[in-house]
Each structure stands twice: as structure tokens, then as C-alpha cells.
Image (cartoon, rainbow, N blue to C red):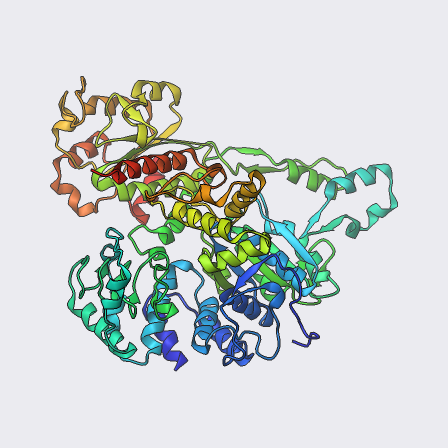
């Protein structure tokens, strides 16, 4: 790549593991899209934003919904405005190009410098959606039929695609991407993450809250395990309520209910299960 | 050497294509990875400290860099990570081991976390390491070949909670971790030997991979049989194109009026299958106009339920189901239909409660209420003949019983239309 030295210099609010750094670098250098999967709340969407700000590149976000069509990312032909203008006798109605509204992909292609494009939650769309983008992502070009114009990327954008595994992606699509699965952070990484978000956090509180957090995650059979973003919310709450670290410390029994656990468990069945477990443990823990 | 790695990956069932392999070579040529240089403490850095110099990635030993790079380029599904790990270990340890033995998988239930081992420091000190790394791996391979069953505790076999160097949730300072969820003692040796993705691997019968294909069938079915409707966007669009001359466009309805009433047999042998069916139908539910599901055990009697945890308190009467959901619903029953024939034909035959009327009577009522009905049976087709209850059920359904396979689903959906 003939770009002037690409330097990551930016945000302090995101901790990337070495593997993730490698995957991002590989995708950037070889200009392939990077498909990112992982548990909810592990910072998939944030990755693109952080890379864009770290590299100082413009970011284009395309949030996919169940009704999204691949075409909407390229361009849309606004026929209704044209019809209205034609009835008002507006002169610009003669030129169809006035009614072509570029989508996110087009805007990323036209960017003056290399852009970062995020296609968020691609699995939400129809299963044919990724297939419709094959050529666009591969050759970074597409054809506008209305104006008979070929849109080509000036600089191949850095493409991030996130998926929550709700639908399987077609093989042909996967073959064109690099893939990274963000694992749930281990304790060390988690400490680094919390440190980045709450720089002044007391050591004790951090240790106790992480212990409580991982204990909850280890409860078997939870429907929705608490994730990083929930941990961060919880710590924010703990700080706001000024909960002392001692309150989090579990007593002799293995499990106790941590305060404000509503931030961690989002499902009434999970809360119920957890409470039952605590109850059982207390009974089991009683001597004799 | 990489070509052999590539072929081994394919042989192990990781779907790698030539383009991906070429991409890996390209990545190596681009010097994306290099020998370790000024290695930082641990592989966790904030973005601000990223620097892309000549060697953009120097946080990890070279072999691990290659491991991660090749995985990002070659493997596109976390379900295949485990297989990749095994192939990687097999290939790069440079030993022509009995590769099949590893791929044949260490059965997951050996690893089930059912035994927790907590050792005091003295205990830990007492556990002697078994010798060097090579000796350890060699022993693991031999044990894998020898061992036949699940094992817990003890200090030799591979299993959980023991002090053997192999397995999970145990303690041996020089141990090889196999199939353990988190890191407990944080000592295990190589990243690919941790097999952290074992529980993401998925190769069961009608697995998620096949569900994708099955879904396509349901989709086609959900789009068929629809009446034509006005395409508002198309009409506006084409009217505008013709400069205001009205041009009405019709398209087939996309989400059609298919309504599905799903009855799932739960309990006992059916549980695994039920999970698959639930996944299958809930994934397809956006394609149906309505999807309602109920559970039953073995056979349908006067009541069914929606929540398995509250099955004894919150039941819905079958009469009520028939009243609520009209004749246009399509009835799909999923179950192995394997039970004592009395449970179908005899009043009071149910194994759970006293039923005033025979199951068959209830089933006939349901079937006459829902003229479009099928029974999906996860048991293989050739076993049906042996079970009298399956035969009776098939007769009740006038032979509209289909195996829970792709072709079976296909035929079932056709029969429903």
C-alpha cells in the first residue's frame, strides 16, 4: 500500500487483544473485509469506530435491519420526488441523476481518502443480502443502471462486518472475508478494559466486582450471560451508589447475591435461577 | 509444507478454498507477521499503542502470530476453530501422529465439568511434572489411543478434575488442557492446545449447517400459494418512470398467509430433536404470518402447554387451541411417536395422568379441525416399521409422516400445501 505511514494513534477507550490487532492489520493490509463475530456486548460494532478514529479516517456506518436490501447501500432512485417535480414543472426533472440518492457504500467509495465502512449486524437481513454484495465488496465497484454510470471506489475502503449469528452467511461471501471471533475477555483483559473506562477505580472494588461478575457468568444454565458492556454499566452503578467493596465480597458460602445485580441479569428466569442457587448453596453450606 | 497443512485442514472437514489459501500466502508475503521484536508484556494493548511499523505485530511469539493470522484468513466459522486447533497442533508439531485418533474427537462428555478439584498449596507442590513438553505430548497421544471411556478424577487417564496432566478442571503445572471453558490455573501450554472452541463445534445430524438448507425449503413454502397483491412501490416507480401515466404493478405476496401450529413432543429421548425443531421454526417464523407452538408428552390429550417449566400449572386445553386457531392453520407435529400403543388407543393410557378419552380420539379431532397436517419424526425411517405406535400414528395421519431430514422436510412442506 502506498499510503503514507498508517499510524494508529487515537482512542484510549478500546482494548484490543493481540489476535484482534493482527486480524485488523491483515484485513487493512490486504484490503479484505473483516467479519467480526462474538458474544453480544464484546465491542464488535465499536471496533470499526475505534479503528476509524485511531487511523483518522472517515467512518460510514450502515446499520442493517430485517427489511434492508443490498441495493439500499448502493443507491436509491427517488421516483416520488421526480414525479412531484414533474408535476410542478421543475427543470431538474429532465436529469435522472438528480434523483439518485447514494447509499453508504457509494459514499464510502467516493470518499477522498480511504474510508472505514461498517456493515453492522449483517445477519439481520434476508439471507440473500450478503450474496447481493459479493461483487461490490470484491471489486469495489457497481453499476448505476438509471444513469449508466460505473461507480468505482477511489480508495478501497476498510470494511468491517459484524454478525450475531442469527443467520448463516453464504460460503461465497465468507470466502472473501477475513474472520475474527471476539472471545469473551479473560480476567486480565477485563481489568485492562475496566481500567480504560474507569481510570480511578479502586483496586479493591475492581477485584471484588470482577470476582462477582465471573462467578455469575459461571452459573450454569443462564439464558443470557452478562457481557462486558453490562459489567461496565454495573460498575458505573456501584460507583454512583458508592457501594463499598466489602459489600461485594462473598461470605463463606460460594455464592451470594451482589448488590444491584439487575444490571447484570436481564432475564427474570435468570434472576430466579440465580436466587435459587444462592438459596441452595446457603443451605448446603450450613454445617451439620 | 503449507500445502500439506491446507490439505489436512480440508481432510479434517474445515471448508477451506484455494482462494483463501492464496490469500494466506499473500498475507505472508506482505510480511504481516514477523519474528518477535520488543515484545510487550501481554497481548492486551489499548489502541493508542498500536503502531504499524515494519513489523506491525510483535506482541506474540512467531508461531502464535502465524496461528492467529492463518485462522483469520482460512477459518470463517467459530464452529471450526476446534478442528483447526487440532490440525494445527498435528501439523506443526511435526509429528506424523495418528491424525485420525485426534480428529475422531475426545468425546465431549469426558470433559463435562462435574467434579471440582481444589488442592492446597502443599498438594500442588507434591504433584510432580511428568517430564518435558515432548514427553507430555507423546504420552497424551498414546493415552488418547488407549483410553476408551469417560474418566473422572484419578491421576492417569484423560478426564476432568483429576491430577493427570491431560484434561480439564484439574491441576498439574505442566498439564495440557483439553476442553475446558475458562482458564483456571492459567498454565496450559499452547494456545491451539487449549481447544477453547470445542463447544462451538457442531456436527450433529440436522445441525445448524443443514438448518440453513432446510430453511430455504420452508421459505419457498412460505412464499408460495400467495395471491397477487398491489405493489405500491412498483406502481409509483413505474408510474413515475412513465411521467405520470398510471401503471399498476402486481407482485406475489412476499410474506404470505401461511399460519403454522406446531406441536412438539418433549421429554426423554426427544429433547435433542426438539431443540433443533425449535431453532428451525423460530428461524423461519418471520416467514410465516403466525407461528404458534405447544408442547406435549408422547401423545396429545385434553391439554397441552407452552412453558416447559410450568407445564403442570399452566396448561392450555386442546379444545381451546382448536377454538382459538382456525382451520387455515397448518398443523405440524414433531415427535418420535414411540410409546406403548395403549397411550394412543386406550382411555386412561397416558403415562402421566388419567385421560378420560383415548389419545387417538383427541388426535382425530385435531386432524379434522386442521385438514393440513403432517407429522415429522426424527427417528430414522427404517425403524418405523418396528414400532406399533408409529404405525398407528401413521394410520391416523393417513401416511403423512415424514422423517426429520432435508428431503423429509421437503416432502412434508409439499404435503402441507
Residue B402 visible in rendering = no
Q: Is residue B158 depicted above or below B404 in this figure?
A: below
Residue sitting at 78 percent across and 52 percent down?
A: A97
Q: Is residue A119 left or right of residue B14?
A: right
Q: Nearer the viewer, residue B269 or B179?
A: B179
Q: Is residue A44 left or right of residue B122?
A: right
In percent of width and height, residue A109 lies at 69, 61
In percent of width and height, residue A124 lies at 52, 46
Q: Is residue A120 depicted above or below A56 in this figure?
A: above
Count of numbered circles in the view: 0
Q: Quadrant of residue B127?
A: bottom left
Residue B380 visible in rendering = yes
Q: Is residue B102 depicted above or below A75 in this figure?
A: below
Q: Nearer the viewer, residue B29 or A129?
A: B29
In percent of width and height, residue A121 lies at 54, 50
Image quadrant containing the C terminus of chain B: top left
Q: Is residue A76 left or right of residue B156?
A: right
Q: Quadrant of residue B376?
A: top left
Residue sitting at 35 percent across and 67 percent down?
A: B187
Q: Nearer the viewer, residue B396 or B390?
A: B390
In percent of width and height, residue A81 lies at 77, 41
Image quadrant containing the N terminus of chain B: bottom left
Q: Nearer the viewer, residue A84 or B348?
A: B348
Amino acid at each position: 500500500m502506498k499510503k503514507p505511514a498508517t499510524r494508529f494513534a487515537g482512542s484510549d477507550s478500546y482494548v484490543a487483544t493481540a489476535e484482534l490487532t493482527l486480524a485488523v492489520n491483515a484485513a487493512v493490509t490486504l484490503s479484505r473485509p473483516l467479519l467480526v463475530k462474538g458474544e453480544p456486548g464484546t465491542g464488535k460494532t465499536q471496533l470499526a469506530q475505534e479503528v476509524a478514529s485511531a487511523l483518522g479516517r472517515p467512518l460510514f456506518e450502515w446499520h442493517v435491519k430485517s427489511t434492508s436490501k443490498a441495493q439500499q447501500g448502493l443507491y436509491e432512485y427517488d421516483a416520488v420526488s421526480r414525479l412531484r417535480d414533474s408535476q410542478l414543472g421543475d427543470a431538474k426533472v429532465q436529469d435522472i441523476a438528480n434523483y439518485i440518492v447514494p447509499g453508504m457504500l457509494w459514499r464510502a467509495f467516493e470518499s477522498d481518502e480511504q474510508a472505514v465502512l461498517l456493515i453492522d449486524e449483517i445477519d439481520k437481513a434476508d439471507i440473500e443480502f450478503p450474496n447481493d454484495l459479493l461483487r461490490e465488496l470484491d471489486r469495489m465497484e457497481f453499476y448505476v443502471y438509471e444513469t449508466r454510470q460505473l461507480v468505482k471506489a477511489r480508495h478501497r475502503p476498510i470494511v468491517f462486518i459484524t454478525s450475531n449469528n442469527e443467520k448463516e452467511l453464504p460460503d461465497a461471501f465468507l470466502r472473501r472475508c477475513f474472520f475474527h471471533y471476539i472471545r469473551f475477555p479473560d480476567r486480565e483483559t477485563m481489568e485492562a478494559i475496566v481500567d480504560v473506562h474507569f481510570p480511578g477505580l479502586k483496586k479493591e472494588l475492581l477485584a471484588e466486582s470482577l470476582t462477582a461478575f465471573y462467578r455469575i457468568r459461571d452459573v450454569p444454565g443462564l439464558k443470557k450471560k452478562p457481557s462486558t458492556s453490562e459489567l461496565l454499566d454495573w460498575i458505573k452503578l456501584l460507583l454512583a451508589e458508592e457501594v463499598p467493596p466489602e459489600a461485594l465480597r462473598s461470605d463463606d458460602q460460594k455464592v451470594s447475591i451482589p448488590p444491584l445485580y439487575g444490571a447484570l441479569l436481564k432475564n427474570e428466569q435468570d434472576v430466579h435461577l440465580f436466587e435459587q442457587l444462592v438459596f441452595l448453596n446457603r443451605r448446603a453450606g450450613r454445617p451439620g | 509444507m503449507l500445502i500439506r497443512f491446507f490439505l489436512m485442514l480440508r481432510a479434517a472437514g474445515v471448508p477451506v478454498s484455494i482462494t483463501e489459501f492464496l490469500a494466506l500466502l499473500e498475507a505472508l508475503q506482505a510480511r504481516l507477521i514477523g519474528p518477535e521484536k520488543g515484545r510487550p508484556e501481554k497481548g492486551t494493548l489499548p489502541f493508542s499503542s498500536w503502531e504499524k511499523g515494519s513489523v506491525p505485530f510483535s506482541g506474540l511469539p512467531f508461531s502464535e502470530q502465524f496461528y492467529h493470522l492463518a485462522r483469520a484468513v482460512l477459518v470463517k466459522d467459530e464452529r471450526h476453530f476446534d478442528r483447526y486447533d487440532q490440525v494445527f497442533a498435528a501439523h506443526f508439531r511435526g509429528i506424523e501422529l495418528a491424525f485420525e485418533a485426534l480428529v475422531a474427537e475426545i468425546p465431549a462428555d469426558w470433559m463435562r465439568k462435574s467434579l471440582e478439584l481444589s488442592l492446597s498449596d502443599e498438594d500442588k507442590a507434591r504433584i510432580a511434572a511428568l517430564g518435558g513438553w515432548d514427553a507430555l505430548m507423546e504420552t497424551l497421544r498414546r493415552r488418547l489411543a488407549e483410553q476408551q471411556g469417560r474418566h473422572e478424577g484419578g491421576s492417569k487417564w484423560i478426564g476432568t478434575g483429576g491430577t493427570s496432566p491431560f484434561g480439564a478442571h484439574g491441576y498439574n503445572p505442566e498439564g495440557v488442557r483439553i476442553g475446558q471453558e475458562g482458564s483456571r490455573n492459567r498454565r496450559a501450554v499452547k494456545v491451539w492446545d487449549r481447544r477453547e472452541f470445542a463447544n462451538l463445534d457442531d456436527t450433529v445430524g440436522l445441525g445448524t449447517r443443514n438448518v440453513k438448507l432446510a430453511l430455504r425449503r420452508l421459505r419457498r413454502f412460505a412464499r408460495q400459494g400467495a395471491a397477487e397483491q398491489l405493489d405500491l412501490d412498483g406502481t409509483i416507480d413505474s408510474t413515475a418512470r412513465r411521467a405520470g401515466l398510471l401503471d399498476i404493478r402486481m407482485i406475489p405476496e412476499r410474506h404470505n398467509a401461511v399460519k403454522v401450529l406446531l406441536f412438539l413432543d418433549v421429554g426423554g429421548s426427544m429433547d435433542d430433536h426438539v431443540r433443533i425443531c425449535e431453532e428451525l421454526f423460530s428461524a423461519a417464523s418471520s416467514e410465516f404470518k403466525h407461528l404458534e407452538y405447544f408442547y406435549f408428552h408422547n401423545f396429545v390429550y385434553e391439554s397441552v402447554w407452552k412453558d416447559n417449566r410450568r407445564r403442570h400449572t399452566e396448561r392450555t386445553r386442546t379444545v381451546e387451541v382448536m377454538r382459538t386457531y382456525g382451520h387455515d392453520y397448518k398443523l405440524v407435529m414433531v415427535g418420535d411417536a414411540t410409546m406403548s400403543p395403549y397411550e394412543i388407543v386406550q382411555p386412561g393410557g397416558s403415562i402421566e395422568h388419567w385421560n378420560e378419552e383415548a389419545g387417538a380420539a383427541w388426535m382425530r379431532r385435531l386432524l379434522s379441525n386442521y385438514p393440513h397436517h403432517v407429522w415429522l419424526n426424527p427417528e430414522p425411517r427404517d425403524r418405523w416399521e418396528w414400532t406399533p405406535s408409529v404405525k398407528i400414528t401413521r394410520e391416523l395421519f393417513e401416511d403423512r409422516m415424514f422423517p426429520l431430514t432435508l428431503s423429509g422436510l421437503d416432502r412434508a412442506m409439499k404435503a402441507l400445501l
